[in-house]
Amino acid sequence: MKTVHVLVVFVLLALASPPAFAPDPAPLQDFCVAIKNTVDGVFVNGKFCKDPSHVTANDFFFQGLNIPRPTNNQVGSTVTLIDVEQILGLNTLGVALARLDYAPNGGENPPHTHPRATELLLVLKGTLFVGFVTSNPNNTLFSKVLNSGDLFVFPEGLIHFQVNIGKTNAVAIASFGSQNPGVITVANAVFGSNPPINPFALAKAFQLNPNVVKNLQAKFRNNS
């Protein structure tokens, strides 16, 4: 009887486990090309998909990622994200990609997080200083100087950054483990929120004068 009781408890605990521990369900079809007009869509595996008989190779195609992007902005970088909005065939496949262009001498992709994806960065050209910071309480910085051909991994949800420390333009390719990785740029979210966060709350959090916080908020609201 004791064995039966133990098995019952084990089963109940398994059933009560949070759903976060369960893996995503496997797709039940080869692909699910996203479609916005659901009148012509087929409801498969919880998603509206284009009728497979209407799918073409162009639904899985994107052209022009080799073209350099401008970097004459406040941070000196441009991120060109290729997700399900650009390639409808990415829907349900759990991947995305981005091209990153950096200006010389300090062009950066400022500290940010991807709440839904791990990122794998491949440097194609130039020299980047990159890193990520672990969660509280340690806040350990893991950083590295990368050159052409080098790879670096940024774990899901952790704050990370890249800075071009070379004298020429730099280019990298980032791959993500989600079709919609999301991005939260720390400075923009904190100082450029709408409506703004109470400056006295931020002053205490960052140990700054409230007037400094107000100036930062005005700057980030103007840049948004």
Image (spheres, rainbow, N blue to C red):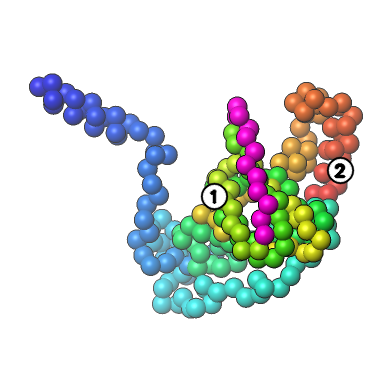
Say if the magenta span includes residue 174: no
Residue position marked by numbered label 1 in the rendering: 118
Residue position marked by numbered label 2 in the rendering: 219
Vertical position of residue 151 compared to residue 17: above or below? below
Q: Position of residue 160 (x, y in %)?
A: 65, 45
Question: What amino acid does circle 1 point to?
Answer: Thr
Magenta range: 136-147
Q: Position of residue 114 (x, y in %)?
A: 60, 47
Residue occupying the far top of the picture: 2
Name the image quarter holding residue 173.
bottom right
Instruction: Name the residue located 58 percent from the left edge and 48 percent from the top edge.
Output: 154
173 horizontally vs 117: left or right: right
Q: Position of residue 33 (x, y in %)?
A: 48, 67
* SS assignment at label 1: loop
Instruction: Name the residue located 85 percent from the left edge and 38 percent from the top edge.
Output: 216
Image quadrant in which the N terminus is located: top left
Vertical position of residue 93 compared to residue 2: above or below? below
Instruction: Name the residue located 50 percent from the left edge and 68 percent from the top edge.
Output: 89
Say if the magenta span includes residue 137: yes
Viewer-closest of 56 and 72: 72
Q: Is residue 47 visible?
A: yes
190 horizontally vs 12: left or right: right
> Of the numbered discs in the image, which one, if any, rests on residue 154?
none
